[in-house]
Image (cartoon, rainbow, N blue to C red):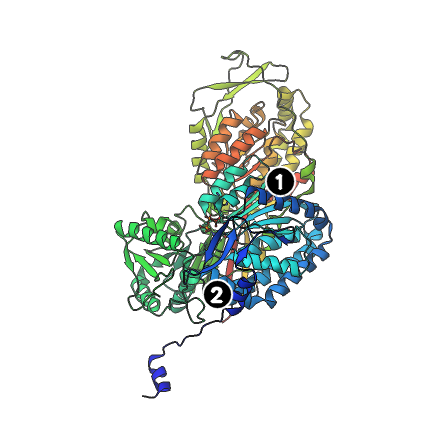
Amino acid sequence: MNKIAQIFETLEYGPAPEAADQAIAWLDHHNRTFGHFIDGEWTAPGTTFTTENPATGEKLADITEGTPADIDLAVNAARAAFGPWSALSGYERGKYLYAIARAVQKHSRLFSVLETLDNGKPIRESRDIDIPLVARHFYHHAGWAQHLHREFPEHVPYGVCGQIIPWNFPLLMLAWKIAPALAAGNTVILKPAEFTSLTALLFAEICQRVGLPKGVVNIVTGQGETGQAIVAHPGIDKIAFTGSTEVGKAIRMATAGTGKGLSLELGGKSPYIVFEDADIDSAIEGLVDAIWFNQGQVCCAGSRLLVQESIEERFVTKLKKRMETLRVGDPLDKSVDIGAMVAPVQVERIRELMARGAAEGAVIYEPDNMTLPDAGCFLKPALVTNVSPANTLVAEEIFGPVLVAMSFRTPEEAVALANNTKYGLAATIWSENINLALDIAPNIKAGVVWINGTNNFDAAVGFGGYKESGFGREGGREGMSAYLKPKWEKDLQAAPPPRSVTPGDILGSGKLDQTAKMYIGGKQARPDSGYNRPVFDNTGLEIGEVGDGNRKDIRNAVEAARAALGWSTTSAHSRAQILYFLAENLDYRRNEFAARIKAQTGEDGADEVALAVERLFAFAGWADKYDGAVHNPPLRAIAAAMVEPLGVLGIVAPPSRPLLGSIALLAPALAMGNMVVLVPSAQSPLSITDLYQVIETSDVPSGVVNIVTGSSATLAKTLAEHDGVDGLWFAGDAQTSAMVEKASAGNLKQTWTSRGLYYDLADRRFEGDYFLGKATQVKNVWIPYGA
Ligand code: NDP
């Protein structure tokens, strides 16, 4: 047979290597040794560590280990640059972002090759996905810079942002962090991951080349300790972190009580659900992308295949066949599908996890028709079957080319399995029945849902997690707001100390024949402790008693709240009606409530009741208006940004304003569909224990509002530690606020704390999106179109 005929016979790929000479020349130009990029200049190299090409094990360069002194320098430079940078018009800042986008495009091949050399990802991906998305991100945010003053009136940048990124999408994660931060007027100190610093260093040169003012972007390289030094630095106003959930939790704890802004993009274990009516060939191709893109080192990798039982066998057989055709090898070869893992330690980790899974009964399939290169960090694609949800490979994020497969029978079972994880980053649904897919999407607890597609990303569409996948979004409007804060926050003053309570006689005065009970699951409840707390008026006279709530009462309340999940999917119109009704019934009893306020505080309560009624009206009005958007990313798809409630929200009301203090926080939470465990003012709880009668007569379903009285600090701690609580708002002193933030790290619940500052909740600024935003999270559902 002649050669061409042979090729047609075997259809073998020929080699298609990408030249690396320009990237190597760039490294050589720097003598393969790098200092940091601080204040627009390169520092002299310090103590260095080596970065290698994971495909060959060859050394690429020596990188400097950032010390606390380096971070100090960078923070000083960023602080000095902040004033002038934030004072520039949005148009001027936008022009710099535009220039960066253009420069990235102009040097895109150099960036792609360098990324592939340093990270091991196939050139096809760095060239066609990572770098174009980087440019797109800077373009998109150039526009935001210019329009911020209209879109986010009365908002200001945080100041100096510390940004820490992982190694799986080195330049793309840099873009996700730096573009919105700069658009908003912040200055940054960014630490790339130790394995993959090179494209960040090349990016520093782009900053020089476009004339970005000195100190606006500072790149400090280093390892975990350098990251820790950034997190701990008192001169940094906001930390934005992408990486593992473990380190994310450590950062949550380290920043607790500091007042630093925080956004966390963490790990995932995302379900890939295939229904029996799916276009199976497309679903298989999607799956290849979902789990073997970037060797599976993707936070949102579709690493858990859930396939409907009726097609399981057929699907798995086809999948195995497809796996045999994947090409593993030199990432610089343009026709390679799976490149090198980032480092030997990562290969080790994955092998260990697979051995554990196998010991627990998993069956692991790896195609035996492929040979791996002799050197370098390569792994075959793997498919894991015969697993239960408890298997290590199902429960743990593997961050490698390993897919675990399970089956389901009904849509309900698919949802239950999909949500059976501590993570909530992404999910994929394949079905030709769009009604079914759109019914499933809202039921999945994840920040991104792809229908009949996977791994779609765009700068205009927010990306980020639910649950232990973190909080905050990158991209789109939500991503922009993560780098801005209300202007008035800087003027907040310390809250006056709560009025001191005279302990009085421990048995109470005995003059009262009734003790106000708690309210749990739609019923009055006595405290589990069997203890009551006296309530005093402003003169120290005992005026009543309430239950002294404890851990068990909180547990019962959270259970009741979780059982009322239907509230989250009740139509916004119905929630609005119920809030209006609540307002009306409260208004009907205004004199009684005003008298109760006066009895507790000595102040005329009429205004406070009127404000509380007005606030309920305000949020009833918002219930069906604070909603999502439809984005038009540059592909044939729409992304529906759906505003969803957090879930079960703990609210610990401020000591002052016994009625409004609770209502101002409760109303936005309910309007957005959250179930609430409310701890009213510890000093003056009677306005809220009176409220349950109003709640009962207003058609609020049982369990939607639960009231537990007692010590604010004690109950806040229990709520913060409870894994069934999705968010916690605490209005009170700085010390307890810090405790709340720290204790919330367990399940990474979203928190808002007043940190001892006085938030005048009567102010109309709290009638709108301030708390609505905190009561919600955005899920982006991607829906492709086209026949
Ligand atoms: P790590 O959390 O180990 O590291 C992330 C970054 O944090 C690195 O720059 C790292 O430095 C630094 N770091 C490590 N320890 C600390 C510390 N104590 N304090 C501050 N910074 C620290 O994650 P990996 O780099 O191993 O990345 C993989 C993880 O990232 C996966 O779990 C993945 O799911 C997640 N990820 C999430 C994404 C998302 O958008 N949600 C996107 C991409 C990844 P060094 O490199 O030197 O260790």
Q: Which mark is residue 519?
A: none
Q: Measuring from the top left, give residue 523's x and y in whole percent.
A: 46, 30
Q: Nearer the viewer, residue 260 or 579?
A: 260
Binning the other alpha carbons within 10 Å of mark 2 as few (below 14), some (14 to 19) or many (20 upward) gives many
Q: Measuring from the top left, give residue 112's x and y in whole percent.
A: 52, 65
| Image quarter of residue 764 | top right
Residue 675 appears in view: no
Q: Measuring from the top left, give residue 492's x and y in whole percent.
A: 68, 34
Q: Is 715 located above or below residue 344 in the figure? A: above
Q: Nearer the viewer, residue 686 or 249?
A: 249
Residue 81 appears in view: yes
Q: Quadrant of the N terminus?
A: bottom left
Image depth: mark 2 or mark 1 in front: 1
Q: Residue furthest bottom?
A: 2
Q: Residue at x 59, y 59 (%)?
A: 203
Labels 2 & 1 near each other (Cβ < 8 A): no
Q: CA distance from mark 2 to mark 1?
A: 37 Å
Q: Nearer the viewer, residue 34 or 102?
A: 34
| Image quarter of residue 56 | bottom left
Q: Amino acid at mark 1?
A: Gly
Mark 2 vs 1, N-terminal side: 2
Q: Which residue is mark 1?
A: 235
Q: Measuring from the top left, give residue 199's x and y in whole percent.
A: 54, 59
Judged left or right of residue 409, residue 533 is: right
Q: Answer yes or no: disc 1 within 8 Å of ligand 1.
A: no
Callout 1: helix, strand or loop? loop
Q: Residue at x 45, y 68 (%)?
A: 332
Callout 2: helix, strand or loop? helix
Q: Amino acid at mark 2?
A: Glu
Q: Which residue is mark 2?
A: 125
